[in-house]
Amino acid sequence: MNVVPLGPGFGAELRGVTLRDVAADESAYKEVRAAFEEHSVLVLRNQDVTDEVQIAFSRRFGPLEVTKVGSEGFGTNLVILKTLDDNGNVVPEDHRLALRNKANQLWHTDSPFKRQPALASVLSSRIIPGRGGETEFVSTRLAFERLDPALRERLENSFAWHDYAYSRGKIAADLASPEERAALPPQCWRLVWKNPANGRGALYIASHTCGIEGMEVNEARRLLGELMQAATAPERSYVHAWHKGDVVMWDNRATMHRGRPWPANEPRYMVRTTISATAADGLETMRAPPRQAAE
Ligand code: OGA
Ligand code: MN
């Protein structure tokens, strides 16, 4: 396996390894895992991707998130990002599916609003629009390391709130359904996620981040806005332009990503698997101390 850095100080392309190798072979997994801890975003090209192979690859890294799809209501390990209705027609721009894609165009990390946040996501492209529709990444590890030491120390000891309804509300007031709001109450996590494999901290922020524990809300949002802006400076990003057979995996503890727009009349169809974080990934260090009883 060859690890070829992508350029902006994080991210690497893996050559000479397939999803099937990793699914079948512990030593291939270990090599890919080490590259994941180091580079935060991994690109694998020319893969023969099926849902089954993507799931088998992803399972190596930890337990998979279970999500519910549409009206069938059964659990699945796949998140389908598409703008096609059940008849295969591209949906109008104000359709829920299109608005959900729009929410994914805000800088974010996956699942900080869940009780068990995500270690990693694995995304494959199945239908690629003729232009646009890239996925863009930044390193929140490098962003954290660029901050001055006093602010770094303060953030390491701060905790932030993450709310799915808050980020969806930036696109449309009712985009998070009542069922989703009830299932996804806001979660509080340390603002810096330290990777136990290498001791390096990363800002743990996203479009979902709505407040900082113990800080007045406007003040908190101003600080969060400054951190977001510093982290997402355009010259610091890696933009992945999708080709058939591409698979991209990212570390949700140390990166943010966003989808890029594409012509609304063109279809796009992506499939994601999401790996939950566990104690081995540093999750326990992220928990806020129990809140003081309200006065
Ligand atoms: C995701 C996501 C962006 C895209 O899959 O989590 O945010 O480009 N995707 O589709
Ligand atoms: Mn995402």
Image (spheres, helix red, strand yellow):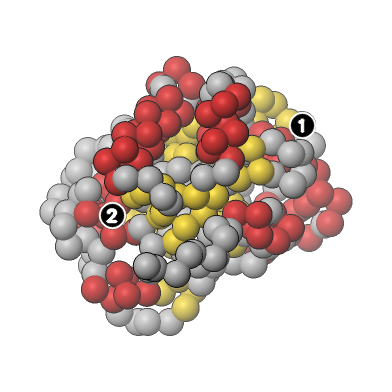
Crowd tier of the residue under label 1, counting other residues whose Cα lies within 10 Å: few below 14, some 14–19, many 20 or above: few
C-alpha gap between disc 2 and disc 1: 41 Å
Residue 93, horizontal then vertical, whole percent: 15, 50
Residue 194, horizontal then vertical, whole percent: 66, 43
- 151 vs 107, left or right, is right
User: Which badge, 2 or 1, is on the more N-terminal residue?
Assistant: 1
Judge whether residue 213 can be spotted in this image: yes
Q: Are marks 2 and 1 in contact (CB under 8 Å)?
A: no
Residue ID at (58%, 40%):
156
Crowd tier of the residue under label 2, counting other residues whose Cα lies within 10 Å: few below 14, some 14–19, many 20 or above: some
Q: In this orientation, which residue lies closer to the viewer: 65 or 133?
A: 65
- 173 vs 109, left or right, is left
**Disc 1 secondary structure class:** strand
Residue at the right extreme, as displayed: 27
Residue ID at (43%, 25%):
230
Amino acid of disc 2? Tyr
Q: Which residue is mark 1?
A: 2
Residue 49, horizontal then vertical, whole percent: 57, 54
Question: On residue 172, which mark appears?
Answer: none
Residue 153, horizontal then vertical, whole percent: 59, 33
Residue ID at (38%, 37%):
224
**Disc 2 secondary structure class:** helix
Considering the image in quadrants, where does the N terminus appear? top right
Residue at the top extreme, as displayed: 235
Amino acid of disc 1? Asn
Residue at the front extreme, as displayed: 295
| Relative to 24, residue 2 above or below | above
Q: In this orientation, which residue lies closer to the viewer: 91 or 293?
A: 293
Q: Which residue is mark 2?
A: 166
